[in-house]
Image (spheres, helix red, strand yellow):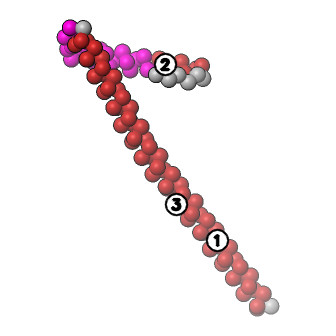
Amino acid sequence: MAKKRKSLATSLDEVDRTMYSTFCSAANSLSQLYSQAMSHQKLSFLSGERHGLEKLYQWISKQHGEGLRVTSDDILAYIQVSIYLHELLFIFVVLDGTKLHF
């Protein structure tokens, strides 16, 4: 009888070790996924920032090409209109479910 209890205890220890190992593996995978998501978020932010600056530069260059002088107020107005239009577009996409590309 003592041998049966010992084998039962041994198998329970093995189950505990397996569950602990599985839990650790899942926790490590989740941590790695979170790290990757944070890295991608940073890259996406930097990409969006670069895209916005390139669009602003193109607009300023176009204004200069047309012989117009660009003031800081003009730049601020351009940025505000761009943000407003993107917010409207976001609302449209969310309500309509359509994906638009620029």
Q: Distance between the residues labelled 1 and 2?
A: 51 Å
Q: Of the two numbered discs 3 and 1 on the same chain, state the one appearing first in sequence.
A: 1
Say the numbered circle drawn on residue 89: 2
Question: For the residue labelled by badge 2, is the local secondary structure a helix, a strand or a loop?
Answer: helix
Q: Looking at the rendering, which quadrant does residue 25 occupy?
A: bottom right
Who is closer to the viewer here, 75 or 68?
68
Task: Tell me the magenta residue range.
Answer: 67-87
Determine which residue is flagged by label 1.
18
Q: What's the residue type where badge 2 is placed?
A: Leu
* Residue located 49% across and 56% down the image: 31
For the point 58% across and 22% down, which residue is it? 98
User: Percent from the top left, x then y, of residue 20?
Assistant: 60, 69
Quarter holding the N terminus is bottom right
Query: With 67 as the anchor, is 92 left or right in this view?
Result: right
Residue 33 in percent (x, y) is at 51, 51
| Residue 38 appears in the rendering | yes
In percent of width and height, residue 27 lies at 54, 59
Q: Is residue 19 magenta?
A: no
Please give the label number shown on residue 28.
Answer: 3
- Label 2: how many Cα within 10 Å (few below 14, some 14–19, many 20+): some
